[in-house]
Amino acid sequence: MPLDRYLSDAAHFPGGHTAGVIVPRSVDEIPAIVRSAPALLIVGAQSSLTGGATPMGELVLSTEKLTRIVDISPTLVRVEAGVTVAALQEHLASRGAWFPPTPTFTGAFAGGIVATNAAGAATFKYGAVRSWVEALTVVLADGSSLAIQRGEQRASGRRLRLGAVDVPVPMYRMPDVVKRSAGYHAEPEMDPIDLFIGSEGTLGAITTVTFRVLTPAPTTALALVPCTSEPRALALVAALRDASIATWRTSDPDGVNVAAIEHMDRRCLEILKEDGVDRKYDVTLPSGDGLALLVQLELTPGTTEAQAFDQIASAQARDARGGLAAFCRVLEQHGGFDETEIALPGNVRRAEQFVAVREAVPAGVNRRVGDAQRDVDARIAKTAADMIVPFDRFAEMMEIYRAGFVARGLDFAVWGHVSDGNVHPNVLPRSYADVERGKEAILAFGREVTRLGGCPLAEHGVGRHPVKQALLRGLYGDAGIDQMRAVKRALDPAWKLAPGVIFPA
Ligand SMILES: Cc1cc2nc3c(=O)[nH]c(=O)nc-3n(C[C@H](O)[C@H](O)[C@H](O)COP(=O)(O)OP(=O)(O)OC[C@H]3O[C@@H](n4cnc5c(N)ncnc54)[C@H](O)[C@@H]3O)c2cc1C
């Protein structure tokens, strides 16, 4: 079997090597594999952006053939670890159901999204993957299998009993934000299932997952909203967030119901224009200091394109009904109605084009980084962060990102999940010195994010990335990392599962 394709992940972490790759065809093979391997890295789609799925000499256990959907009901689905998010959604769609916390990359596997506690754009409404995991089967380092059902067991204070093992629950306090992928989950009386979610393959091999799902799937519309400035855009985001939270509280069928708002800053829009993306998809993007928002709205299930159109047309009438009409009124109040284009339910092609515009941003940035690596200096690499702050500190955080990059003379672009206060500041390096300055800026941002009550590691995890490991140490201190090590030692005394991932071995 050609091993090359298993030697790196989407982070293009250098130096990947392995003695071999095992691709079990059945979950029943996994206990024996784990028991006998001296060192093992379990991988899914290897879309990790942290080097966490890059082997450094360990045997690779690929879950790619574990693709069975074991069981499905209107509220739950049980899948093997290698089922992709896309396959899961397709299967659910055929039954009118939906899995909400979908990461942007839908080729990711069920095991991978649980191992990293991934999160998607719609975290604002639905939370991260963690809150959708109902049960797990995990093979521990000694080869024993553990079936964990949420709610069945709790830690007694700071001690957690798992099979024959006593696990010390870490003492650090996690930041109070909607998404975190920052080492081991820890809270008094915690549910053991939460220890494995987000543990990045260091505590056990996840073989099956039971997810909660939504039935029926919501009917959605997608709005591309050009904004003339960041303050205006953030005022609109704040109004849409507040209105949506009120709608959920009152179950108002005529209220604004936003699941996600994505954000692309001024530099992102320049990149889209340089790459001809606006012409390709015939979208209007603002210039100057403008930026663009992509708003995912949920409408009453079954709303047709014609009904949605009527809601927009009648939005200003006193007796206007429907969430789309309410959304248009908020837009009007913020001066954004005339420029906004809405892909109505049923217009799947236009919605896909809007999504393609958004996805062209990271693709354009990554291509520029790759070009600089090829043409300027082979040491140039993606230099980016994935941080979250409580939304009321978001404007402050954006100012800190901007000032930190400008002070270091860096070209940069920022985009992401603004409805969560989680965006991805990225450097566009022109030299290796830019990469070094970018890393220094990111470490400084981590300190600021922590000071603002946020988390410097929101959704991609920690992996083997030295900057991300430093951010984790900055968040919890050396004492916190030692407490994570104690958990690892209790469950994997020989340190054989994903050694070096999350913290140095
Ligand atoms: C274009 C692009 C867009 C992305 N967008 C998002 C996004 O919106 N949100 C987000 O959260 N992430 C995003 N990511 C990052 C990535 O997709 C997620 O981290 C994803 O959860 C990784 O899944 P995977 O199957 O590829 O896992 P891998 O990359 O193969 O593995 C990731 C980690 O999980 C461990 N692992 C994998 N499977 C198992 C298992 N069965 N048991 C135990 N441990 C396991 C591995 O050891 C590794 O440490 C994006 C990545 C790309 C390339």
Image (cartoon, grey):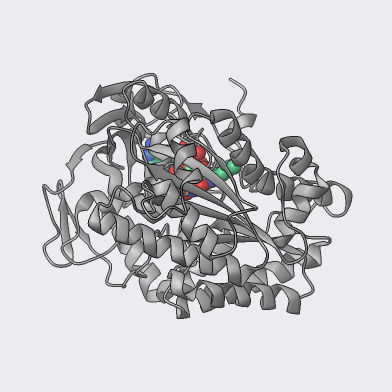
Residue depicted at x 33% and y 60%: 245
Residue depicted at x 37% and y 57%: 244
Q: Quadrant of residue 97?
A: top left
Q: Quadrant of residue 61?
A: top left
Q: Is residue 177 visible?
A: yes
Front in this rendered view, residue 162 or 230:
230
Return the residue found at the far front.
318
Q: Is residue 127 visible?
A: no
| Number of on-image labels | 0
Q: Image check: 161 left or right of 383?
A: left
Image quadrant in which the N terminus is located: top right
Residue 90 is situated, as x and y percent measured from the top left of the image, at 42, 24
Residue depicted at x 40% and y 73%: 476
Residue 3 is situated, as x and y percent measured from the top left of the image, at 60, 28
Front in this rendered view, residue 92 or 284:
284
Residue 181 sits above or below residue 51 on the image:
below
Q: Image check: 205 left or right of 448?
A: left
Q: Image check: 483 left or right of 477?
A: left
Return the residue found at the far right.
375
Front in this rendered view, residue 300 or 149:
300
Residue 458 is situated, as x and y percent measured from the top left of the image, at 46, 59
Residue depicted at x 76% and y 45%: 367
Q: Quadrant of residue 453?
A: bottom left
